[in-house]
Amino acid sequence: MPTAIFTSVEAGFIYALMALGVYLSFRILDFPDLTVDGSFVTGAAVAAVLIVSGVNPFLATGAALLAGFLAGCITGLLHTKGKINPLLSGILMMIALYSINLRIMGKSNVPLLAEETVITKITDFWKSLGIDDGIQAGLAAIGVSNFIPKTWAVIMIMMLLALVIKFVFDWFFKTDLGLAIRATGDNETMVKSFSADTDFLKIIGLGLSNALVAFSGALIAQYNGFSDAGMGIGMIIIGLASVIIGEAVFGAKNIIRATIAVIGGAILYRIIVSLALRVEFLETGDMKLITACIVVSALIFPKILDKQREKKRRKKRLARAQEKDDAAFEERGQSLAAVKTDL
Amino acid sequence: MLLLKRGGKALLQLRQIYKVFNEGTPDEKIALDHVNLDLKQGDFVTVIGSNGAGKSTLMSVISGKIFPDLGVVKVDGKNVTQVSEHRRASLIGRVFQDPMAGTAPSMTIEENMAIAYGRMKKRGMALGVSKKKRSFFKETLENLHLGLENRLEAKVGLLSGGERQALSLLMATFTEPKILLLDEHTAALDPSRAELVTQLTKEIVEKYGLTTLMVTHNMQQALDLGNRLIMMDQGQVIFEAEEQEKEALSVDKLLAEFQRIRGEKMSSDKAILI
Ligand SMILES: Nc1ncnc2c1ncn2[C@@H]1O[C@H](COP(=O)(O)OP(=O)(O)O)[C@@H](O)[C@H]1O
Ligand SMILES: [Mg+2]
């Protein structure tokens, strides 16, 4: 059980990058971009193929990021210059990427288990620092020695990476360019009237979003030890689930808060799924259904809660009014009684 | 002679602007019918006219939101007839009728100001709201006397319609655009708010000496503000008054003038038909 949660958090930090990308398109740009299902695999495919052909895994991951950026820009071009509606632009790109990803990989699955990847590199580096032993000793000292993960390298480095990306993300959306991108999602007319090219801003925004998604895909491929043409199916919903769960649990009153919420949401999502899969009758294949259920309930529950709160408030108000009525009635009764005794 | 004080340079020139919507269909509508208009540096022109006269279309042609079918638009001597809306916007400030249209609701007051501030520059990776800019924004916001300078980090969506419109006006003007376009920017506000925004408009236009074109449905406002007035009807400018001539006008005189011109036009149309 602790191991399952540990790996959920580990993977959660990596998927958090994808969720940040989804947050960028869905929330900041107000553009429901479905490119994600394709660009996630593009990232994985580019990184995997380059790694297998002997390129340094860090370079390969950088190239994956660039490929995602390009894919996002094309979706942006389809929408802005081709005047195709947002959903359709994304779906078209997603479908196109499916074939492109197969072309990149040359087959539907590229294994990476025997390769040197970013994950093996950071694990080796971490081991050379000898921190694991320290942590293990610490844990033993406080009496949790039965829980011993293989290494703390991945969780620590990925947490660091997610936090660094979060800070860069926060900073970027406070720059002139970042503010203009945010405003484009908020009020396009206004941004245009202040001489900003909203087409360009949307293209850049979608590029950055898909760069993050592809980055995440590249790391997941190396983490899982393979890249697969089907690994992106439903990714957009997973991203959305992370965003919605994060916002609901941690709040999102500004970008700084929202980005931390999205990272938290991505981790929570992983934990929920791994717990759900421990339920006897659920199978791995049910994961997409579980995800859909999570998103649906995350969308519906807040509304139900609101309604219930409103109902309670109404009841209270009614009760208060009733009390007043009763008091008035009693008063009248007393005065009547007084009148009677007078008689 | 007052004209000389305002500098003779023509900042906005419209020549033979013609725009037709839904051409060749039963809904065909000539929105602008060979309109000519010149604004000199510092001119403040108010525009009145019945619904559908073509006032908003005229504003859209100037701002580049739509392109005319015929004619030339020049701003500060440059032919901008085919220049895209956003590019032209570096020269033109705009306030819309809808108070929601001029600001980004989910962003803070200072972030909105930063976007307006970016009008003249290429937007890069510099911090949008630096310390220096923040104090400048604060100072600028004080001109509104609404206390917004103390709410820099409040989301604009939380402001009232009047406050948002005042902020829109400030944002459209503090970078001193060549031309300011106001399209019924007080029409959606309740009377007291409208009065406030009108007053601010007067102050700000004077302060920056902005060359302004203001559409209003309020005749009194059209008479109170500005040094020139034009009346539009059916896509044409049918009446113009400037300086002393304008000062001598009253609402009643304007209405009488409108009836007279319309009557004349109708009888001449009839003459053609016969
Ligand atoms: N985008 C458009 N498509 C079709 N007709 C339009 C469009 N915009 C304006 N019109 C028509 O052009 C005429 C002028 O409209 P407008 O400039 O909005 O008038 P005003 O602002 O003076 O009330 C109206 O008859 C209007 O119906
Ligand atoms: Mg109008």
Image (cartoon, coloured by chain):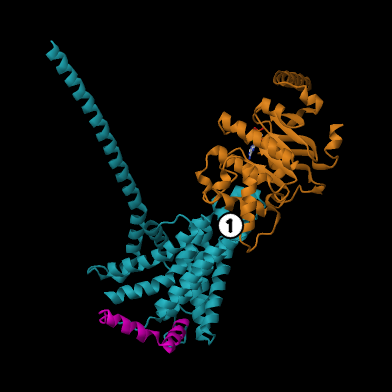
Chain colours: A cyan, B orange
Vertical position of residue B77 compared to residue A73: above or below: above
Asked if the stretch drawn in magenta spans residue B102, the answer is no
Using the image, determine if residue A13 lies above or below residue B258. Answer: below
Residue linked to disc 1: A179
Q: Residue at x 28, y 75 (%)?
A: A2
Residue A130 belongs to the span the image colors magenta: yes
Residue B199: image location, x then y, percent: 65, 33
- Depth check: give the residue in front, B170 or A98: B170
At mark 1, the secondary structure is helix
Q: Chain of mark 1?
A: A
B141 left or right of A211?
A: right
Q: Quadrant of residue B25?
A: top right
* Residue B24 visible in the current orientation: no
Task: Give the vertical position of A185 relative to A274 (above or below).
Answer: above
| Residue closest to the eye, B74 or B273 | B74
Please report the residue visible at 79 percent of the width from the left and 27 percent of the height from the top: B241
Mark 1 is surrounded, within 10 Å at the Cα level, by few (under 14), some (14 to 19) or many (20 or more) other residues, namely many
Please name the amino acid that badge 1 sits on: Leu
Q: Is most of the magenta stretch helix, strand or loop?
A: helix
Of residue A15 and residue B261, the one placed in the foreground of this image is A15
Q: Where is residue A144 shown, x and y percent of the image? A: 26, 79
> Percent from the top left, x then y, of residue A286?
31, 66
Residue B12 horizontal side relative to residue B182, left or right: right
